[in-house]
Amino acid sequence: MPLTDTAIRRTKPSATVQKLRDGGGLYLLLRPDGGRWWRWDYRRPVTGKRNTLSLGTYPDVSLVTARERHAAARRLLAEGIDPGAQRKAQKLAALELVSNTFEAVANEHFALRAKKLSAGSAKRERRLIEKDLAPWIGHLPIASITAKDVLEALRKIESRGAVETAHRARLLASQVFRYAIASGRAERNPADDVKGALSAPNARHFASMIEPAQIAGLLRALHGYQGSPEVVAALQLAPLVFVRPGELRAARWADIDLGTAEWRFSASKTGQPHVVPLARQSVAVLRGLHPLTGRGEFVFPGVRGRGRPMSENTVNAALRRLGYDSDTMTGHGFRAMARTVLDEVLGFRPDYIEHQLAHAVRDPNGRAYNRTAHLVERAKMMQAWADYLDGLRTSS
């Protein structure tokens, strides 16, 4: 006899499992804890093995709906399709679809790279994914995204006046698409197709000094700074080595060989091994600091704990206390200073300078950056640079 809603409601749980049958293999499983589950017993096509398909719980799935689901499953079975196997395939397809959305692939790509990024870079990249790209294309299967989709997302950023952010978002999206192609989830990179479609960002350079008189005054101020030994050493070393600020503050003693006067690490931008020949003045600064921080990992440990490097704002904050605002000089500005003066005043070859700045330079055979390229000449250049700075600082 077919079930009725009244009969279902009147049947109370017992100490054992009850089956309230509706016909055609459909029944309501009533458990001792009160749970009510719609079930259908059938035999799989081809093998003939018995299987049970869950059709939902009562009362969320009513008797009418359970019968509709039961009828649909029986039609599949009549066509030789196993409804249980089809459901599993649909779930797997749904999971695959979710794992292949732009946001999922971007998060996977970010997780692989996060350890190589500085805290600041990781935070900025995460924000680009979550706030600027994911709201517009994050839910789309990455293989289906077109250049038009990407451009519309970037236009949203551009429309709020964040032109440079839009360009950074395009670069990040391009990296995600390249990763998707490499992992077999996409065939093309639509972010590359929108190059030139965005407004040109306003040219902005890090504040720096290139006039000898200005540099001389700055160097005297740096050497006269009253602060912790770590900050004083960082200020004195920054113009001598002109590495990126993040590379300076994260310097590790294990990477520095004071005997050979070399500092070896992976450049933060290119990821390539980099060598900084240390002039005598640089070695002197480091030897003076070593008794204080040499037992720890970082050359310039943070004030909140020796297990972390100096804060990314420390050098710039010291420059502000010395009277140099962000429009006059920044920690990054030492690189522009060295690039200009080494070329225009001291006359060193541009490729020596570019190698020392850890830029991606091609050699005559077309090979990318080589950490040992022109190392002897670069060591001479770094000593000449340190001597030039000393001359400016001590001049009247």
Image (cartoon, grey):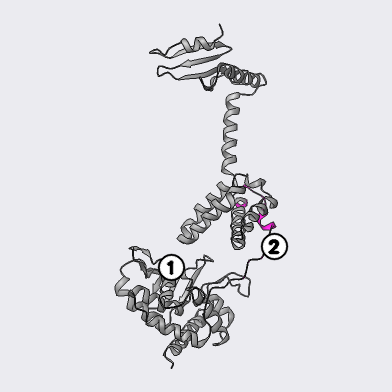
Q: Secondary structure at mark 1?
A: loop
Element type at mark 2: loop
Give the percent coordinates (x, y) of residue 233: 37, 76
Task: Tell me, yes or no, if residue 189 can be seen here.
Answer: no
**Residue 322's spot in the image, x, y percent?**
41, 78
Residue at 57% from the left image edge and 84% from the top image edge: 343
Q: Quadrant of the C terminus?
A: bottom left
**In the image, residue 106 above or below residue 251:** above
Which residue position is annotated with label 1? 313
Residue 165, position in %: x, y?
59, 60
Pair 1/2: label in front: 1
Residue 113 shown in magenta: no
Q: Which residues are magenta?
A: 181-203
Q: Residues within 10 Å of mark 1 (few under 14, many from 20)?
A: few
Q: Quadrant of residue 303?
A: bottom left
According to the image, label 2 marks what residue? 196
Q: Main secondary structure of the magenta part?
A: loop
